[in-house]
């Protein structure tokens, strides 16, 4: 059973995957409470399934970009479980999870998350071979700058300012329900990588940080 945890943004999400389906998932706005909330949620989900941490055979974690403190908490807990149990750890870029959750209505899309202080982190993905592939590296920008060259399909954490600007620019955006980060997508993607042998030693999984202007 794979345990997935996403603490890259203001959301906190945990999911359990058995290789065929999502067994359990919980997502909530956590703000700055990742440290106190993550471990209890993991234990609660396991208890609901009458399982324990000893039933976990792999761990997937969102490794950024994202919140410095959020990533530190999630990756720290993920490493601790994986190293303590001597099981595989799969690090997955945050925007890759956003792209993975996006239906391919168009062949190009932009994945975005909030970066604080009116900024966003955005990355462009192209649909090819039944998979979203990144084009270039993610960047820190503002909504005002982003819409100047925005892709017609945008998914992720879109606030009121972003929604207004994107709609004015004629972009196709997803409803508020899509903006909640769901570890179920991370778990599904993590399991695929696990099955393909894309795993690393816990000590080698590092957070991905971006440094923007200012």
Image (tube, rainbow, N blue to C red):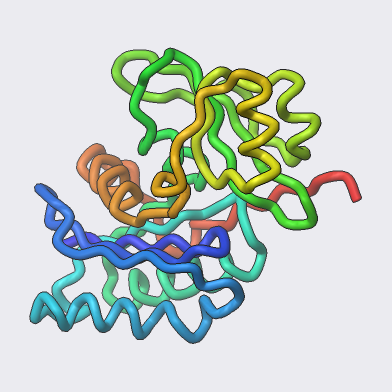
In the displayed structure, would residue 93 be above or below residue 70?
above
Q: State the image quarter where residue 1 is shown.
A: bottom left
- Residue depicted at 57% across the width and 25% down the height: 124
Measured as percent of width and height from the top left, residue 39 is found at: 38, 82
Measured as percent of width and height from the top left, residue 135 is found at: 57, 21
- Residue depicted at 13% across the width and 50% down the height: 21
Measured as percent of width and height from the top left, residue 191 is found at: 24, 47
**Horizontal arrangement in the rendering, residue 211 relative to residue 180 (left or right):** right
Q: State the image quarter where residue 206 is shown.
A: bottom right
Q: Foreground: 163 or 120?
A: 163
Measured as percent of width and height from the top left, residue 28 is found at: 42, 68
The furthest residue to the right? 214
**Horizontal arrangement in the rendering, residue 34 relative to residue 86 (left or right):** right
- Residue depicted at 77% across the width and 38% down the height: 141
Q: How many marks?
A: 0
- Residue depicted at 61% across the width and 27% down the height: 167
**Horizontal arrangement in the rendering, residue 194 relative to residue 107 (left or right):** left
Q: Foreground: 86 or 112?
A: 112
């Amino acid at each position: 059973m794979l345990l997935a945890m996403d603490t890259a943004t203001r959301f906190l999400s945990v999911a359990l995957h058995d290789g065929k389906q999502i067994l359990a998932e919980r997502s909530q706005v956590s703000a700055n409470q990742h440290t106190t909330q993550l471990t209890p949620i993991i234990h609660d989900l396991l208890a609901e399934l009458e399982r324990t941490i000893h039933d976990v055979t792999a761990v997937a974690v969102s490794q950024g970009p994202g919140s410095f403190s959020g990533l530190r908490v999630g990756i720290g807990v993920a490493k601790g479980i994986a190293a303590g149990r001597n099981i595989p750890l799969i690090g997955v870029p945050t925007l890759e999870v956003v792209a993975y959750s996006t239906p391919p209505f168009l062949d190009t899309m932009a994945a975005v998350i909030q970066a604080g202080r009116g900024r966003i982190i955005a990355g462009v993905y192209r649909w090819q071979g039944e998979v979203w592939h990144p084009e270039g590296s993610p960047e820190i920008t503002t909504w005002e700058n982003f819409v100047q060259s925005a892709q017609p399909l945008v998914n992720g954490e879109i606030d009121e300012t972003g929604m207004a600007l994107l709609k004015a620019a004629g972009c196709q955006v997803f409803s508020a329900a899509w903006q909640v980060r769901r570890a179920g997508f991370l778990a599904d993607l993590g399991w695929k990588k696990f099955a393909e042998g894309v795993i690393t030693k816990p000590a080698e999984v590092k957070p991905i940080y971006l440094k923007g202007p200012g």
